[in-house]
Image: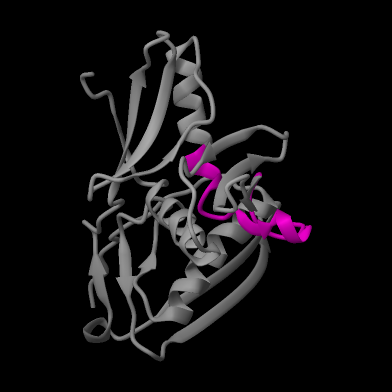
């Protein structure tokens, strides 16, 4: 039987980054959702309920290979190579003070996240977008009003913080490990659940969102 390679990629990942990637796969499998093959989620496989797993550990040519291979009958696995990467778009723009800012706008028109500051250089604003794309999907979520702390294992280089503002509304911010807030929701929510829904939308939509420069 002939073989056809649908997708193949190789990249270096930190131990933490690898854990985040595998966690995304495990979460999709556990929920019965299409499994993302690439980081952007543009290639997915919707697998059957039961499959074969082959695990192999070997040394060859000075390298240790740890391979996990999953197999399903072809007729029970649906592959999508044009999966929607995101339902949102990053907008990179200059504000009235001639500083560069970004916002993440959902297809429904709502702004679901924005940067916490303006930048004198467009490249710095672009770097801020890239940091959110890289860190939002795997970031842990903690309630700082309850003095919760992020687990030491897994996650990314940033953490979603839930908190209450002076108006007693729930808000979220994405804080990098260096202490900088790299994104926030831009609005308050009447309930913690609504705030969590907002940040979850950012988690799922930020990685594959296109970057545009709308005319002001």
List the single residue furthest toward the bottom: 50
Query: Which quadrant would the N terminus be assigned to in this image?
Result: bottom left
* Percent x, y of residue 77: 28, 80
The vertical placement of 108 against 28, above or below, is above
Query: Which quadrant would the C terminus be assigned to in this image?
Result: top left
Residue at position x 55%, y 53% in the image: 169
Residue at position x 51%, y 61% in the image: 196
- Can residue 67 be seen by looking at this rendering? yes
* Percent x, y of residue 56: 60, 74
Residue at position x 36%, y 46% in the image: 208
List the single residue furthest toward the front: 167
Horizontal arrangement in the rendering, residue 108 relative to residue 178 (left or right): left
- In magenta, the rendered stretch is 132-157
Horizontal arrangement in the rendering, residue 37 relative to residue 193 (left or right): left
- Can residue 151 be seen by looking at this rendering? no
- Does the magenta segment cover residue 141? yes
* Percent x, y of residue 76: 26, 86
Q: Nearer the viewer, residue 45 or 63?
A: 45
């Amino acid at each position: 039987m002939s073989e056809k390679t649908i997708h193949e990629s190789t990249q270096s990942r930190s131990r933490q980054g690898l854990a985040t990637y595998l966690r995304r796969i495990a979460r999709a499998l556990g929920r019965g959702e299409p499994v993302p093959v690439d980081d952007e989620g543009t290639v997915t496989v919707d697998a059957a309920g039961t499959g074969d797993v082959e695990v192999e550990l070997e040394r060859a040519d000075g390298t240790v290979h740890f391979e996990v291979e999953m197999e399903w009958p072809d007729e029970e696995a649906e592959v999508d190579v044009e999966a929607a990467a995101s339902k949102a778009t990053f907008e990179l723009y200059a504000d009235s003070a001639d500083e560069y800012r970004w916002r993440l706008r959902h297809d429904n028109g709502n702004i679901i996240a924005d940067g916490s500051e303006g930048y004198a250089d467009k490249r710095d604003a672009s770097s801020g977008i890239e940091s959110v794309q890289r860190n939002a999907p795997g970031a842990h979520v903690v309630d700082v009003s309850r003095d919760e702390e992020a687990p030491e294992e897994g996650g990314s280089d940033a953490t979603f913080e839930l908190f209450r503002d002076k108006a007693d509304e729930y808000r979220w911010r994405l804080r990098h490990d260096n202490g900088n807030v790299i994104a926030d929701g831009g609005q308050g929510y009447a309930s913690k659940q609504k705030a969590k829904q907002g940040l979850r939308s950012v988690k799922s939509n930020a990685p594959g969102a296109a970057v545009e420069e709308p005319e002001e």
